[in-house]
Image (cartoon, rainbow, N blue to C red):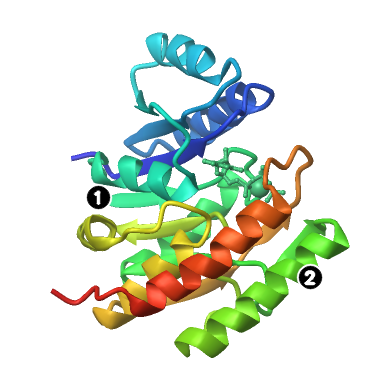
Amino acid sequence: MRLLSIIIPVYNEEERIVRTLSTIIGYLEGIMYDFEIIAIDDGSVDNTPKILQNFASSYTKIKVLNNTINLGKGAAVRNGVLNAEGEYIYFTDADLSTPIEELEKFLSYIKDYDIVIGSRATKGSQILVHQPFYREFMGKTFNKLVKLFFRMNFNDTQCGAKLFKKDVAKKIFSISKINGFAFDVEVLYIAELYGYKIKEVPVLWRHSKGSKVHLVKNGLEMLVDLFRIKFNNYLK
Ligand SMILES: Nc1nc2c(ncn2[C@@H]2O[C@H](COP(=O)(O)OP(=O)(O)OP(=O)(O)O)[C@@H](O)[C@H]2O)c(=O)[nH]1
Ligand SMILES: [Mg+2]
């Protein structure tokens, strides 16, 4: 069995996906982990699908999955997780805002925990490039809402980097339902319901330009999804 599966949700990332994949491969080959990369094209309408196919045809450790229409980050990550074979499953954003080198830190905790989540708001985190102030403000407000709503004590549910033990990830993502950006909250909520051990670790983080997040549309959808999470029944 492979040690590590790296899951990357990819939506209209023609500008940076080759650089991102090359960076990840360079790093992982360097530390000689046995790994697979699963890139999920989330119904991109630019050249991303073609670029991914090309890349994968010359590098066997990359698997490309396609959501034929754009379903959202949560759906893309779910598709990747359910098809992953690694003992540990890590997902990260295509902009590598949390640099892949941080993975080392996640791996150092995963033996003692079921899930390790990156945090931009925990003592020790280093934000080298900040998001625009309104995005940062919205992020912090969202996190306060999550704390209030779910009585969960995470400082940052939305950081793109998270590592799971395989069985834990498979279990959670097989019952999760949220397709959009609020899926992280759902995943952590389910994890707490099932009593999994979660470690929040401070990460180094760098905002990168080229956001495709639609503030109003995605923001409202995330709020509605918080209610859906609250009223869904995940215990079977
Ligand atoms: N925006 C967006 N990203 C998606 C979608 N589906 C998958 N993704 C991927 O989800 C990851 C996270 O996206 P974000 O980092 O939130 O979006 P971003 O465009 O980088 O914006 P910032 O948060 O400003 O960095 C990226 O790897 C995207 O390619 C989608 O429907 N919309
Ligand atoms: Mg990003």
Q: Look at label 1 and name its amino acid.
A: Glu
Q: Residue at x 40, y 36 (%)?
A: 32
Farthest right residue in view: 133
Report the front residue among 57 and 214. 214
> Quick check: 183 above or below 25?
below
Q: Is residue 130 left or right of residue 98?
A: right
Q: Residue at x 66, y 27 (%)?
A: 16
Q: Which residue is mark 1?
A: 87
Mark 1–mark 2 distance (CA, rounded to whole Å) = 36 Å
Q: How many marks?
A: 2
Q: Look at label 2 and name its amino acid.
A: Phe
Q: Which residue is mark 2?
A: 137
Task: Kindly identify which numbered label has been placed on residue 202.
Answer: none
Q: Say which quadrant the C terminus sits in.
A: bottom left
Q: Is residue 178 left or right of residue 166?
A: right
The mark nearer the N terminus, 1 or 2, is 1
Report the front residue among 26 and 71. 71
Q: Is residue 16 left or right of residue 66?
A: right
Question: Is mark 1 in CB contact (under 8 Å) with mark 2?
Answer: no
Q: Mark 1 and ligand 1: say if the CB distance to the nearest ligand atom is below 8 Å.
A: no
Q: Mark 2 and ligand 1: say if the CB distance to the nearest ligand atom is below 8 Å.
A: no
